[in-house]
Amino acid sequence: MGAENRVKFLVRKVARGKWETTPFADGEIPADTLTSELKTQGNTLSFWESEGEDDSLWKEVALALAASGERIDRLDVAWLERTTLSDNGIALEKTPGKTPVLDLRDRHVDAAKLDVMRLVRVSHLLAQAIRVHKKVRRLARSEVINLLVEGARAGRMKLEDLKPLVREEVETKLHEK
Amino acid sequence: MATSIQPRQSSPISRIRLLPSLSSNASINETGQGQDAGAQEQPSIQLRQSQGISIPSLELKRTLQNAIAHLYLIETWGAHHERLGWLFAGQTERHQDLAIERQELVYRLQQLFEAEPVEDGMTHPAEGLIERVLGQQRTAALAWLDELATRPDYEHRVALLRCLGRMPVMLAGDWGLSVMSRALRSEDMEVRDAAICALELWGTREAADILRAHHDPEPWLAEYVAAVLQSIA
């Protein structure tokens, strides 16, 4: 398959527990999930574009997200096909990603011009991706650290661009190995 | 100095109709008349009572205590003893202070958790508050936090467990392990998830022992436990 024909995915950081919890009927999404997990800014939601079906699909995005964090924790990422959003009337706009990983900054995509109805649609699509299609991956903390260390070793980010707690831990690991 | 406090004959609060709780089959129509649920379709949005805490009331309480102590209003207290008794009833001064500090902690936590969720990869202001309170009076604070962290109906239980899990392992100690052990027995998967996350962060042999003994019914959480155990080992 040519590069231009490869399926594109949009990956987003989630808190898996909030999506898997269903105190109501099957398929219903708790309001708390919407308000805590899909917090919009300027009527946009942040996604990262990725390609392919293997682990690299989520690994690159996980690196971008972990490197921009204030501390290192386990990390959940979920994804859906780009066309799933665009076919549902969600406008997608490329915007610069806020991550210290330089080569991933142009992978950032905003779901833009979201009104309440479109936001609810996004929540249903994400819930389906996580609950039904299991397009979700949890990285244990040690996996996140390994990603960051590999990224730093490959020179994909400057250590001084990392937040203090993250930098400290990555530096320690770099010296250990 | 004579002071009189007139009871309000008809407080507005007494006229507020109580709305049906989740378990009630009753509903209220626009005229305020109760109806049986069988006669009309159950409303899709349900209302229930919950407890509110407001800092002004705590400040008011402290102000009243000071006023009574310093201005000798206590002389006029007799007639209103029943209504003001809650200020001092059976408590020493130290206990009053602790009760107020506990309420303030609960209130501050509520404020912080409502302002922003606890997010992976991001620090949360409640972490600093918890460390400060534990630094000031560890014994009392541990009891308050323990009670909140183990109460199934505490609405910020998951957020609190996440913040407790971020305490340095030396500060959390055996108490932290005990709280997380109990959280692992919860039916709420988010509570168990928060406990596993805490044990992952602490990463001690004791934490690993607790995780090894835990068999989570949720497959993705069981996988997480396995991954954590592998990394601790």
Image (cartoon, helix red, strand yellow):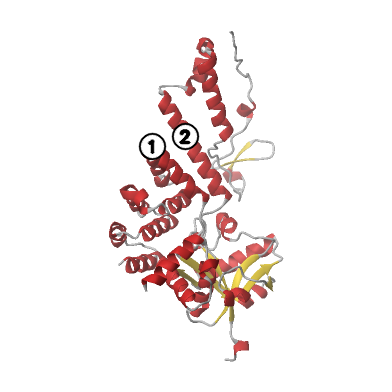
Asked if B104 appears above or below A30 in the picture, the reply is: above
Mark 2 belongs to which amino acid? Glu
Asked if B228 appears above or below B180 in the picture, the reply is: below
Q: Residues within 10 Å of mark 2 (few under 14, many from 20)?
A: some
Q: Nearer the viewer, residue B152 or A15?
A: A15
Asked if A104 appears above or below B77 in the picture, the reply is: below
> Picture coordinates of residue B124 (x, y %)?
51, 52
Q: Nearer the viewer, residue B168 or A119?
A: B168
- Please give the chain letter of the residue carrying mark 1: B
Asked if disc 1 and disc 2 are in contact, CB closer than 8 Å, the reply is: yes
- Which residue position is annotated with label 1? B140
Asked if B147 appears above or below B184 in the picture, the reply is: above
For the C terminus of chain B, which image quadrant?
A: bottom left
- Please give the chain letter of the residue carrying mark 2: B
Q: CA distance from mark 1 to mark 2?
A: 10 Å
Q: Residue at x 41, y 52 (%)?
A: B167
- Which residue position is annotated with label 2? B101
> Picture coordinates of residue A177 (x, y %)?
37, 74
Q: Which residue ends up furthest to the top in the rendered image?
A: B1
| Numbered label tally | 2
In this view of the protein, can residue B12 be seen by the observer? yes
Q: Residue at x 49, y 66 (%)?
A: A76
Q: Nearer the viewer, residue A171 or A129?
A: A171
> Picture coordinates of residue A58 (x, y %)?
51, 75
Judge left or right: residue B162 versus residue A41.
left
Mark 1 belongs to which amino acid? Ala
> Picture coordinates of residue B147 (x, y %)?
40, 42
Q: Residue at x 52, y 60 (%)?
A: A70
Residue A173 quadrant: bottom left
Tag 2, which secondary structure? helix
Tag 1, which secondary structure? helix
In this view of the protein, can residue A17 be seen by the observer? no
